[in-house]
Image: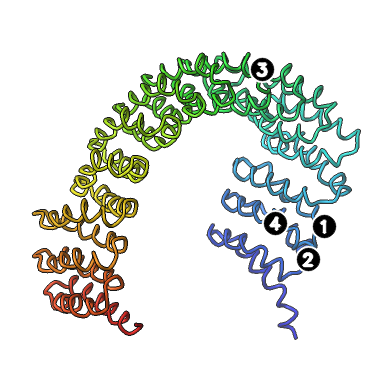
Amino acid sequence: MAAMVDQPLYPIAVLIDELKNEDIQLRLNSIRRLSTIARALGEERTRKELIPFLSENNDDDDEVLLAMAEELGVFVPYVGGVEYANVLLPPLETLCTVEETCVRDKSVESLCRIGAQMKEQHLVEHFIPLVKRLAAGEWFTARVSSCGLFHIAYPSAPEAMKTELRTIYGQLCQDDMPMVRRSAATNLGKFAATVEPAHLKTDIMSVFEDLTHDDQDSVRLLAVEGCAALGKLLELQDCVAHILPVIVNFSQDKSWRVRYMVANQLYELCEAVGPEPTRSELVPAYVRLLRDNEAEVRIAAAGKVTKFSRILSPELAIQHILPCVKELSTDSSQHVRSALASVIMGMAPVLGKDATIEQLLPIFLSLLKDEFPDVRLNIISKLDQVNQVIGIDLLSQSLLPAIVELAEDRHWRVRLAIIEYIPLLASQLGVGFFDDKLGALCMQWLKDKVYSIRDAAANNVKRLAEEFGPEWAMQHIIPQVLDMINDPHYLYRMTILHAISLLAPVLGTEITTSKLLPLVINASKDRVPNIKFNVAKVLQSLIPIVDESVAESTIRPCLVELSEDPDVDVRFFASQALQSNDQVQMSS
């Protein structure tokens, strides 16, 4: 009987022991098991014993505190549901004041999660006082945390309290500590979304105005994000009156970080102010950013070229954006050129066929010949977008010579990108053009110095056979494969074996039995063990493709011979293939 009485006490005793243990791992484990312990204790004892204990627990290790903040966020069911959710607030309030940022952020996240479930009356009695206490905290960490809780507290507050919360938020935006002002700027959009439209124009906009003139660039750049969030909440004319001038000023800010944020967010800002003001006010601002003297700003702006052009009419894009694009394509920073190359193809559908041929094609060609491999890669990977606009004939005339050149590029990743693009090109160019211009290249890659290229080339041959059919493969691929299987270099012979195993399912039983199988059987006499055990692997993959009689009369004897090879790996793979052969025989 005594044992039964003591039993519920046992988990909490273990927890308390482990939470005070010097070993951080034990403390962490017990925190992560809080939900199990709470279930064992029951709801009432969890409220009366476990939560107060956690509130008093002043662990100094951030990892333990972070785990605790995370666990408490999902603890509402263990304390008796929403009715008692307020008992979880004290320990989280303490965690909101610690020095480590990630612990505070997680505590705020957990408080928001709990607050979203709480009843209105409990929010007024417990949650709003907590927000006010944090906002008035002596130590800046408490004030930083409070900024992330206003959007949960505000909707349920009575009218007088709402006014007070708006005033407090205004004070936080003018706090002496830049960290507090940063947090206020970050959370302004969330808070503004809960404020009534009448107060939005007065209180929130005046607060926002202060943040945009802050002397710290780290605060101003967060206000840029606020522009987009507030722009969506305000009516269009207010947005043009209040937000647009701020964006234009920010685009000329003395700090490059702020200009970088504007360049990054510009598309969202354009959506907020609407098409007309974008054309008249934001196009000049964007052009300035594209010509900024800081490379980081130009990179961010270049990455948005296509998105921005879509908002404009083709005439405006050609008149204002294209001259900047031409300048950027010869920018001194390779990263700017790379950012431009990754999006410039998307401009083709915006500008239409004529402008693409006249203006964009020369830029593509210059970027395809760029000395920096990433720039070339980014252009290659998006070629299909241009093809849709100008058609394959023009594309092949203007870009194909450059593609052939890149097929022998000194950087293997560029060669790889070209290989991956070949099947798409093949389907668009048609078989005649392909054989003429690119057929030889595909075979040449099977002898590349880099394994990844040889592997991709083998896959490429298979995809081409799928595209053009077995007849084509018989004429153009099989003769070359027959030739290359006798290459003096064993690595190239291995690549051919890999290609055969990929081609066999595509070419079917007849061609495999008459053309490919004899090659593989012949290769089993190779003097290099690596070739021989690869032969065993390939034969295993061919068993389901060829007829049963062929498997029995040709493949099996060859595998039996390999299973008696002096090399241990050859014997292993040969016996594996024999087992597979026997299983196929039995199942059939």
Q: For the residues marked 4 and 2, what is the alpha-carbon distance in whole angstroms?
A: 14 Å
Q: For the residues marked 1 and 3, what is the alpha-carbon distance in whole angstroms?
A: 51 Å
**Depth-wise, is mark 4 or mark 3 nearer the camera?**
3
In the picture, measured across the screen, residue 423 lies left or right of residue 232, that is: left
Q: Amino acid at mark 4?
A: Val
Q: Say what secondary structure mark 1 lies in.
A: helix
The residue sitting at 87% across, 44% down in the picture is: 124
Q: Which residue is mark 3?
A: 277
Dot 1, crowdedness within 10 Å: few (<14), some or many (≥20)?
Answer: some
Dot 2, crowdedness within 10 Å: few (<14), some or many (≥20)?
Answer: some
Of marks 4 and 3, which one's residue comes earlier in the chain? Answer: 4
- In the drawing, what numbered circle is on residue 74? 4
Q: Which residue is mark 1?
A: 84
Image spot of residue 392 (x, y percent): 37, 34
Of marks 3 and 2, which one's residue comes earlier in the chain? Answer: 2
- Position of residue 545 relative to residue 468, above or below, is below
The residue sitting at 20% across, 75% down in the picture is: 555
Q: Amino acid at mark 3?
A: Pro
| Residue 26 image-quadrant placement | bottom right
In the picture, measured across the screen, residue 528 lies left or right of residue 6, that is: left
Q: Are marks 2 and 1 in contact (CB under 8 Å)?
A: yes
- Position of residue 225 relative to residue 92, above or below, is above
Q: Which residue is mark 2?
A: 43
Q: Say what secondary structure mark 4 lies in.
A: loop
- In the drawing, what numbered circle is on residue 41? none
In the foreground, 360 or 436: 436
